[in-house]
Amino acid sequence: MRPFRKTNATMTVIIIAMAVGSVYFSSLHADDANSVDTFRQQWNDLRERMDENLADAAQYLESLIAKDPESEDLNTLRHAVATRFIEAQQYKEATEQFEKLLEFQCDHSDKPANQFGILMTVQSIQDMVRQSGDDKPLQTAVDRGIEALQSKKRQDQPTALLPLSQLVVLKAHFLVADDQQDDAGAIVQSVLQKLVSATQSERADEETMQALLRMLRSLTTADRENDQWREKYITMLDQTVSAAMDAYPESAAIQNEYAETQYLMITQWRQDDPDATTERIKEVAEKLGSVAVRNASVRAVLRRLDLHRERIAAVKPVDSLIGKPAPPWDVDAWVDASQTTQASLKGKVVLLDFWAMWCGPCIATFPHLRQWREEFGEQGFEIIGVTQYYNFDWDEEKSQAARSKDDVPPPTERFAIARFLEHHNLQHPVMVTPNESEMPSEYGVRGIPHVVLIDRDGVVQFVKTGAGEAAAKEIHAEIKALLGSDEKAE
């Protein structure tokens, strides 16, 4: 199951209060001042009761809803009560409030506000699950939300597509976690096709395009459940976001989607060819140059890309490494408390693997790393992993690493790395370099995974960036050649 983001409970209350004050007040008749005043008084009374006694507050809200069961405003206040129950770690009571709110929203899903409300409620349950550890309410909520948004009455409403697509990704992740990969792929493909058709219909607009882009983004994150389709949807996202930019060049939202996607393409997904990466940075900068004048978010992305370009330019050329002694290692700490040193490995063929926990292509190489260590380990071969601090923590219950919004101390992150390696059955030594270390640059790292092969005399003989079967076969042949166990494969 995917790692869930934890939402600060106090901030959730503020968000709900803002929603009540803007979205739901606006749903009341503008000329019915008494209705607005009455609701404001009810909201104030509820807050006071929540401060004194949560159970009493919940009963008070039930009495109000019993008198006016069709009130969207009153039903939405369940969210605030549920949030307070979460703060008190009363998860059963919180679940009851969320379930009642979700049922109301599903029963009234003809309104776009409730369609998005379904997604917001599910996401709030998702946050609660992160704390409670019981994901059953989330699975139930996801199924109920999908059922409502996929009903025949909703199929012709494009506004339902965005919340539906996000719930379907959650459902697919549950299915993958239960080893139902085919079913997961089928429901994803079904909704994706609806989104693609919507973007090509006469009623297509930038909102439907955004829904498609957001679903593709959700399918390409570093979550383990995305492993089976990530590469396919990265390619689709790359093509779709370019088409979106051409179709809606004046849309700030589409401009932001394009800029952020290109940043990911350049820094994480398609960065195994330094020359192609540099060329893409140039193309993106040219395309977004005029846009950046009036779009601050795009300007920020372009600044980050410019810094990335400077880092690439500063990296030592790979050609300058070959045939030279391996640069010194810069070790902040060993993940496995290893006593390994550069000197202690002299006489062995060493594979340095530069990687990160968030890197999908890196994870794709893990089977090869395990295979090579098993095949060549007794012939004087060792693998050394090289990573750095990315502010990741480990979710023991979900068996996953996730980027934290809070500062993660280095020992805590090293523990996360150790658990991550254990989870993937990787047993080779792994070092973490200090922040701002020059070691990646000294070894020509412009993208990851990045492999450097060092011979028995400590001399660099081979460098390769990128994943895939072709790269793996090439690295395997070089290892055999350096060990003298076989001729290089042609």
Image (cartoon, rainbow, N blue to C red):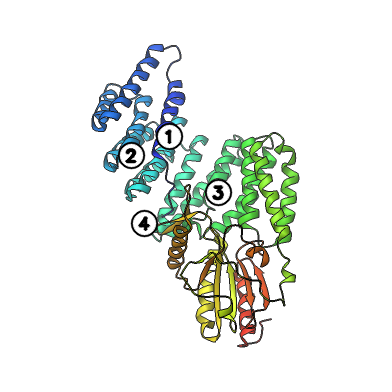
Dot placed on the residue nearer the N-terminal end, 1 or 4: 1
Please give the name of the residue rendered at 39% of the width and 45% of the height, measured from the top-left corner. 126
Q: Is residue 69 visible?
A: no
Residue 281, percent from left and from top: 72, 51
Please give the residue where the numbered disc 2 appears in the rendered image.
Answer: 87
Q: Name the residue under label 1.
A: 117
Name the residue tied to disc 3: 217
Amino acid, disc 1: Gly
Q: In this view, does 448 lie to the left or right of 139?
A: right
N-term mark: 2 or 3: 2
At 30% from the left and 37% from the top, the residue drawn is 85
Which-is-in-front pick, marks 2 and 4?
Answer: 2
Q: Residue 44 carries which label?
A: none
**Whether residue 49 is situated above or below residue 349 in the rendered picture:** above
Q: Specify few, some or many for label 1: CA neighbours under 10 Å numbering under 14, 14-19, or 20 or more.
A: many
Residue at the spot x=62%, y=83% of the render?
Answer: 456
